[in-house]
Structures are given as structure tokens and as C-alpha cells.
Amino acid sequence: MGAYVIRRILYAVPVILGVLVLIFLLFFVYAGGAQNIARQVLGEKVRKEAIEEWIAAKGLDKPLWYNPRASGLGRFEETLFYAHMHDMLTLNFGKSWRDGDDILEKILRRAPASLSVAVPTFLAGLGASVFFSLYLAFVRETWIDRFGTVTCVAMMSLSILIYIIAGQALFAIVLRWFPVSGYRPLPLGGRFIALPVLVGTLAGLGGAIRFGRTIMLEEISREYVRAARARGLSESRILGIHVLKNAMIPLLTSAVLSLPLLILGSLLIENFYGIPGLGSMGIEAIQANDFMELRALTFITAVLYQIGLILTDISYTLVDPRLRLR
Amino acid sequence: MKGKFARRYFRSNPLFLLAVPLLFGVAGFLLSCGTNPYPREETSGHTYYTSYADPPKHLDPAVSYYSYEATIVDHIYETLYQYHYLKRPYELTPLLAETMPKVIYVKYPDGDRVRYRIRIRDDVLYHEDPCFTVSKEWGGRTRAVRAADFVTAFKRLADPRVPCPIRPILSGVIVGMKGFTEANKDRARTDYDLPLEGVQAPDSRTLEIELLRPYPQIRYWLAMHFTSPIPQEALEYYNGEEGRGTLDRHPVGTGPFRMTEWVRRQRIVLEKNSRYHEECYPSEGEPGDEEAGLLRDAGKRLPLLDRIVLSYEVESIPRWRKFLQGWYDATGLARETFDQVVTKRGELAAPMAVRGVRLHKAVEPAIYYFAFNMNDSVVGGSSRSARKLRQALSAVFDTERFLRIFLNGRGIPAQEIVPPGIFGHQGDTNPFHGRNLALAKRLIREAGYPDGIDPATGRPLVLTFDNAMNNASSRPQLQFIKEQFEALGIRLELRTTDLNTFRSKVRAGNYQIILSGWILDYPDPENVLFLLEGSQSTIPFGGENRANYRNAEYDRLYAKIAEMENGEERFRLIGRMTNLVRRDVPWIPIFFNESYALTHSWCRNFKMAPILNNALKYRDVDPEKRRAYQEKYASPRRAPLFFLLVLLLALPIAGYLSVKRREG
């Protein structure tokens, strides 16, 4: 398996490099030059002199790819492209353009807020989807199953935005169970996290239950289930122990792939509920045209996604020892 | 048999058995949450709760530039002068200065200069801060403000290592400022012992500022936080070393409030400065203020509030919902909620009035306009034909309809370029403004394009409208603009690009018509009239005159009014400039923006003042009234939770019954 993991990591390298080149093209080439970037960050009313100062201070006065004024390797090294690749690969994300904070520090500071929402959402979502998909499999071919399936399809059809806005309206305005928005770190901030967790869980539940139910029903038709029934095991025991164990591979695949989301948070939920995590950091960076923050977040997303894919492969062997990775 | 099935069903189902205590645990937690978005241990009292959508980037008064930062900075730092809270047009009054400045004209061999002599108050103390040593005289870590602190502040504005956004402006008028910057450019650290010739402190209570030329607008800069006094001790202490941070994060001012908490992207708390110098609530205002209850606290010591809690709220819907629950005392009015709050007649909707909500309106010192490129061969230039064409385009645009459709009527049609509330606003009618189709058609005929037809081609005249309105919501606006201008028989080509391309086009002078806007930095007509001054042309000087309008008469008048004090003569000259702009039409002024705000019944002394950033020191709240409102509109409704619990607990029973039926 060690060789397989190393090979997978090596496959990820060109993907990451490709992402870095794309980031450069998007943020530095397509952005239309240093003058435009400066105006986007500083605003329209800032004087010419201030813009020139800002460009020089941020090192954006270098050429993009090739510096004819330098000599030797400097022609390539004293360029924006080299600086970008070098900074990203050495994890030197630099300082934020909008507030001058160290970006890596900022990411580490804001990650706990994202995790405090994402981890409970992930666990509650996984628990609820397993519970309800088992339940639907248990009551299969009854009116409850049909009603549940239709409800799941309806839940899948709604956009996350509807969940966010309607969830807030229902739970915070009509029922008044939670604060509308806000944040305090745990353990004191449980009431602030409850609503985003509830909404995040509900938003993903329709698809997850339907997926889980399909997997469960597929497993129910297998030989070992018939054998278990013949041995006189109760239906709920068969489902809750034997079927669930075998259904874990596909469930794990979808769960592990959401790992990057766990760390980066959900952009919309965090932004709307005032959670100062990495998702809202991304939105703020977009609004402020802070390319330094955006490129760091994009890079981290790409890396985490690759890690997520590798972990998915590894998790297969953990759940099912019959599988071997080569 | 039936009993056996039921026993097996429930007993062997570990998930259901686990779910029951879990459900009760969750329900108990839900019951304990409630809507209060503030820490429970806090008592509200005379605390003002509001929100901010843009987190401050800088709290250093020399660097902070945006109005959302000023809302915080201007309550912590103070300036020599401030605007009167109630009077309009805006009026400057002394704050840290004893009186208005004494202006002295000084003759030098190389030309005349203007010196402003300002006497500083002697009873103003800084906030208590570890940067000061314990003072026996004042009984704490503080000291009195001295004139030298203003000199330090001006040196910081000139410091090449401080990214001060207004340095280019002040360097052009204050003697020696450019020299100070240059002298420090190549040094490793800025030397604050070097003199700044134009800013001197002859004694601890006298400040002298010397200008290269008459520039009455300097007084407005002296009412902005850039020129707030900075104690040398704070500069030395908050130098970023030994974990002490910088002045950008640790403001040390003299203001009515001091910052006691700043959790990035969560909240900012300002507490009353117990050592605040004597300042009282104004006892006079403009007509109507007394009837509005704005003079009830006349003569009371400021500030009236004990605390200000500003919560970070980036989205407008949660902000609005918290306001409705009584957790925010005041809020702006977002487009999404406008129809709920304001009737078609512009009044407060009945459901809001029942809750005791009040609606406030104010015209902002800002203008939105179409600009013609005066260098263009068709719409530009001073020929009779081009002028008539621009006049026709001005006379055909229906501003009132535009405001009604796209801005919920929040704006005043602009008949001129100086906004209302600013000295020099003429308040008369522009003959070429507003929809007058007959006049517009006559003008375009006189321009040589009868019914909009270009005689050179025999086809409708084609004009281009460059814009960066590339999102879906802007499309109806673009369509409206197109229809308005095309009513003349011409064809308007919409050239929609991304913002960068648009900017590049404007900078290169490669356009015919654009839509633009300007927010005034200070309430002086010079700050908007300069946008049409010749030496400010984008082509070739790279300035803010995007229309590239050049009119010798206008420039001459501008040079005069820029150096004049307000008075009849200045008003008359601005009137002449206004008429020149109306005749030449380098711009079609569209509207002056109007902002709306909502407050609850417990808010006192709320008057909108878009130019002022220190208004919270005048405001107050009635905490009892607020508590009663929150009881009514924000207490949890618990009954549906029990209903939900019953529903969830019924799941296994329903499952049991349906499986039983399935299995016959």
C-alpha cells in the first residue's frame, strides 16, 4: 500500500502545479495589470501617487513572466510568476492586502470557527442520514417509505440558499429558538452554532438519505442477509449491524470527499450566520479583491481535495480488508 | 404472537433506543438557546447596539480612509474641529481647539503664504493607556493634549512609511511637507526630530499651520481624523515590538469612547471615556429639531451612552431580522426589505409603525451622473452642434422614473452638480433636465440630427454607452437608459465590459458616454466642482475630470472659489459655474442619493448626518423600553418543539405498524 500512496501523491503534484498556474493566470494576468488590481483593492477615489506607492510596496511592479532588465537567472526569478510559485510552494502566503495580516496565521486563527460548525454538521449529517436510511430500508415498500423518498427528492431539489434563508426565518424568527446570527467560540457559543449546524445538516440530508437507502436496499437483496434471516436474526439487527457494516464503503467515499469542506467551511452558511471561519474569509477576500488571500485559500482547497481523494482510497482497505491497493 | 413481534422490534433496535435520550438532550438544549445574540453575562443598560458590514482595516487615524472605519475611529480620536450635530448646511465648530482658527497672511520674498493659528484646549486628556507613565497631576496613566501632539500627527502624515491616503493633497498645500517626506525617504527609520516647517507648536497650547497658498478647505481636513493628535508615547510604545502591536490596532485618543474589545470579524466594544473633557449636547439646531425631540437633552454632558456594541453582520437579511427582534437599535434599509418598511408614498408602513419603528431620511453629499467624453468628435467639443446634441440627451432622460423604478424613489433628481446641504447648491431648475421630449427633439434637430438621423449616413446616429454593468440585475437599468436616449431617434450601443476594461477605456479616453458617481470628502462645493476643472482632466493629466471638460471661464471661476470663504460672492460665482455646466452639458447630473435609516422607539437624539462620524456621542437609549420590546418580539416559542418531539417519537410506532401491515 505504501507504494500506492507514494504513487498517488506523485500523481497529485502535476494537478497542484496546474492549479497554481491557473491561479496565477486568473489573479495576475486576467486581472488586467497592477493598476487595475490596485484600484480594485484601494477603491476608485484613491490618488495616482497612492496607487503607485501601493504597487511598489506589494511588489506588483515586476514583469509577469520575463524580466529583460535583470541579468542571468534573474530574468526569470525577478518576475511575478516566479515569486507566486515560490511563495505558494514554500507555504509563504504573505500578508493580506486588505488588512496586512499574515495569511497563514489568519487561516490558522479562523479554522477553528469553521471546524466548530463543520464537524458537528458532518457528524450530525452522517448520523441522521444513516439512521433515516436504515429506517426507510426497514419500512421499505410501505407508505412511510414512499413518503420519505418523495420528501428526500423534494429536499434535494431545494437550493442551499433556500435552506439558509428559510431555516433562519423558521428557527430564529418564527420559532425564536436560536440567535439569528453571531458567533462565540465553544463551549460558550453552542447556541450560535446550533442553527448553522441544523441548517447545514438539513440541506445535505435529502440526498444523503436517498443515497443511503439505495445502498441499504442493494445490500438487503444479498445472500448474507437471507442467511441471517434464516438464522432467525431480527430485521432491525440485520439492518443495524450486518447491512450497515457492508454499506459503509460507499458511505465512506462520499463522506471522506467532504473533508476539504470540513476545514474550509461552507462559504454561504458561514457568511450568512456570521461565523468567522475560512468560508466567510473566502467571501470577504472575493469582495475585497484580495488576491493574496484568495490564492492561498484556492491552493489549500486543491491540496486538501487531493488529500481527501487519497484518504478515500485508504479508507476502503480499512473498512473492507479484502481490498488491496496496488 | 403480536406481543412477541413488538418486543423483538423495540428491544433489538439499538438505534431507536439510542435515539430517545439523544432527542430529549437535543430538545433540552434547544429550549435553552433563545435569540439573544450577545453574551448572557452582559447587562445592556445604556448600551447602543448596532452592526457593521465592513470590518475596519485600519484604526490608525493617519491611514484609515473609509467611512465605515471612521464610525469607530472618530469616536476614539478627536479633531480640532467638528461639524455641528444638528445644524444644516453643515457648520464647523471647535472641538479640541478653543476657537475657530485665526488666519494670518504672511508675506515672503518668494510669495505670500497663509498661516492658521489655533489655540488648543487645556482640559483634554488622553484615554488611560499603558503607554503613558502614571501622572500625579491626573491620577492615572494619561496626560493632557499638547500642541506638539498635532505636530507629531502631521509628521506622520508626511512619513513615507505611513501609507497615508491624503498625503498628496496636504503635501501640495502645507509648507515643508513634501520636504519632510523626501528627507526621510532614504533613511532606515523616519526621524521625527527633523522639523516640519509648515506645522509648528510655538508653545504647548498654540498650533500654527502654514500653507503655500490660500486653501480654506484645510479647515475641513482639520475636522477629519487624519489630523487627530498623536502622543509620542503611543508611537514609541505601540511599535510592533515585544508583542505590543501597533497603533493601527491600539488606538490612543481623547474621544468620548475608548475601545475595550475588538474580536476580529465578531464585534467591537467601545466604553465611555470616564475622563472625557467637558462637552455638552447642543442647545440649538435647525427648524423642526425641537418638535422632533432632538433638543430634549440640550446642555447634558456628553457622551450619553455608557457602551457601544458593534456586531459584525455582513448580510443584510440577518441584520434586518435582528433589528426586528430588538437586538439592534438602528439599521440601514436594504433593498430586500424596502417594500416591507416603506409605502409607495415614501412613508413608514403601518406594521412598522405599530412596533414603534421610526424612519429617517437624509440626502447624501454625493452625485451620480452621465459624463460625455469632451474629446470625442461627435458628443464632445464646444461646437454648437455637439452642445445641442448633449443638451438634447440631457432633456430626454427621465430621472424621476429612473429613481422610481430602480432606487425605490431614494434620491433627488439633480438639477446641478452641487448636492443639497452643501454651500453653493443653487436649488433652481436646469432647463435641460428631466423628460421634455418636445424640447429634446427640437434640440437634436438644431444639432443637425433631425429625428436622430445622421445626415452623413442617412441612418440613425449611433452613440456608444460604455459601462461595467455586467451582472444580470443591471440589465433592466441598461435597457432603460437605452430606451430613454433612443426616444430621440438615435441608436445607443451598449458596450458592456468587465470593470478593468472599462477603467482602461476611461483612462485612455476611449468612450463617448459613461455613468459615474462621486461622494464628497468634505461639505465644500470645491470638492465636487474640481471634477470638471481643466487641469484635472483624465486626458492628458490622469486626473478625476473624466469628461475631460476644459472651459477657460469655468477654470478661472474655480480658481477663485477654491480660495474663497463662503459668502454671497462665492455663492454667485458657483451659480455662474453651475450655469456653464448646464449650458455645455459635459455631464448629465442624474440624482443625489438619499439614504434611509430605521430606529426603534427607545433610541433618542437620532438625526441622520452623512458627513458626521462621531454622532454616537449624542445618542442615547431607553433600556426599559427595549427590554419590553424584546420580551414581546424575541422570546422563544416552545410549544412547536414539543409537537416535533412527539412526531419524532411516533416514528418507531408508525414504522412498527406499517411493517406489521406489510408482513401481513
Image: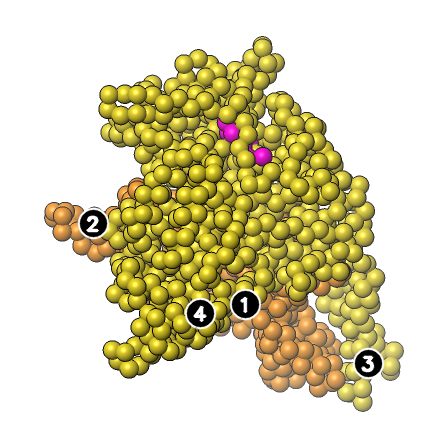
- Where disc 2 sits, the SS reads helix
Name the residue beneath numbered marker 1.
Answer: B401
Task: Say whether mark 4 and mark 3 are on the same chain.
Answer: yes
| Residue B277 picture location, percent across and down | 61, 22
Label 3 to label 2, Cα distance in Å? Answer: 74 Å
Residue lying at the far bottom in this picture: please name it: B664
Residue at horizontal 74 percent and vertical 81 percent from the top: A144
Spatial distance from mark 4 to mark 2, Cα to Cα?
A: 64 Å
User: Residue beneath label 2, please?
Assistant: A77
Q: Residue at x 78, y 56 (%)?
A: B354
Q: In this view, which residue lies farthest toward the top? A: B136
Name the residue rendered at 35%, 50% in the picture. B532
Tell me which corner region of the image, top left, top right, bottom left or bottom right, holds residue B465.
Answer: bottom left
**Chain coloured orange in the rendered structure:** A
Tell me which segment is drawn in magenta: B76-84
Report if residue B78 lies within the magenta region. yes
Q: Amino acid at mark 1?
A: Arg
Disc 3 is placed on an element classified as: helix
Pointer 4: what residue?
A: B439
Among numbered discs 3 and 4, the one appearing first in the sequence: 4
Q: Chain of mark 2?
A: A
Badge 4 sits on which subunit?
B
> Of the residues tagged 3 and 4, which is closer to the observer?
4
Residue B374 visible within the image: yes
Task: Specify the quadrant that holds the N terminus of chain B.
Answer: bottom right
Report the front residue among B383 and B597.
B383
Frontmost of labels 4 and 2 is 4
Asked if residue B462 shows in the view, the reply is no
Report which residue position mark 3 lands on: B657
Residue A141: x %, y % from top left: 71, 86
CA gap between label 3 and label 1 equals: 64 Å
Hue used for the chain lettered B: yellow
